[in-house]
Amino acid sequence: MEYLFIPLIVMLAPVLIVFIVLRYRYRQAQERYRTLLQLADKGVELPAQLLLESQGAGDERRRGLVLIGGGLGLMAMFLTLPGQLDNGLGISHLWGIGLLPLMTGLGYLASWWLNRRGDVRG
């Protein structure tokens, strides 16, 4: 029975973390909307900026850099791990797994760069 307990905890921990973060964001948005409704009920004219969801200017750049770093880290980890898989291949052959976050990060950086160029022109 205990051989199922540890893997279950390991697999449920990330799900629980994501649930907590999403619930926090949901409650934060609800409080924001409740405040906006109270202001509107009092007759205060709401500026358009208050109605838009706030997003940081560097979010895409930050995500891109974190994913690139994670992808490079995964690639380095797999390349340096000793050991063999069941089919006789070394674990170092799994370095390509790091390409997924690396390429996703490059996509975020490209999106940030293109959006930045559009803001300068417009």
Image: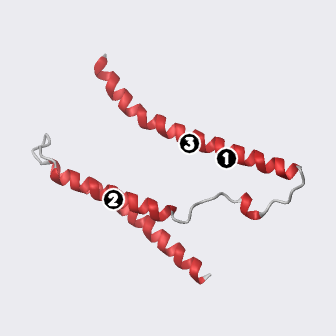
19 shown above or below 109 = above
Q: Is residue 59 left or right of residue 30?
A: left
Give the amino acid type for the residue marked by disc 3 in the picture. Answer: Leu
Q: Nearer the viewer, mark 3 or mark 2?
A: 2
Residue 62 in the image, given as x and y percentages of width and height: 45, 61
- Residue 3 visible somewhere in the drawing: yes
Q: How far apart in space, not on screen, are marks 3 and 1 (Cα)?
A: 11 Å
Q: Earlier in the sequence, mark 3 or mark 2?
A: 3
Residue 33 in the image, given as x and y percentages of width and height: 74, 48
**Viewer-proximal residue among 6 and 32:** 32
Q: Earlier in the sequence, mark 3 or mark 1?
A: 3
Q: Is residue 25 left or right of residue 48?
A: left
Q: Earlier in the sequence, mark 2 or mark 1?
A: 1
- The residue under the point 34% across, 22% down is 5
- The residue under the point 36% across, 57% down is 101
Give the SS element for disc 3. helix
Residue 10 in the image, given as x and y percentages of width and height: 36, 32
14 shown above or below 109 = above
Circle number at residue 29: 1
Considering every residue shown, the one lying at the far top of the view is 1
Q: How far apart in space, not on screen, are marks 2 and 1 (Cα)?
A: 31 Å
Give the amino acid type for the residue marked by disc 2 in the picture. Answer: Gly
Give the SS element for disc 1. helix
Circle 1 packing at 10 Å, graded few (<14), some (14-19), many (20+), is few
> According to the image, label 2 marks what residue?
69
Circle 2 packing at 10 Å, graded few (<14), some (14-19), many (20+), is some
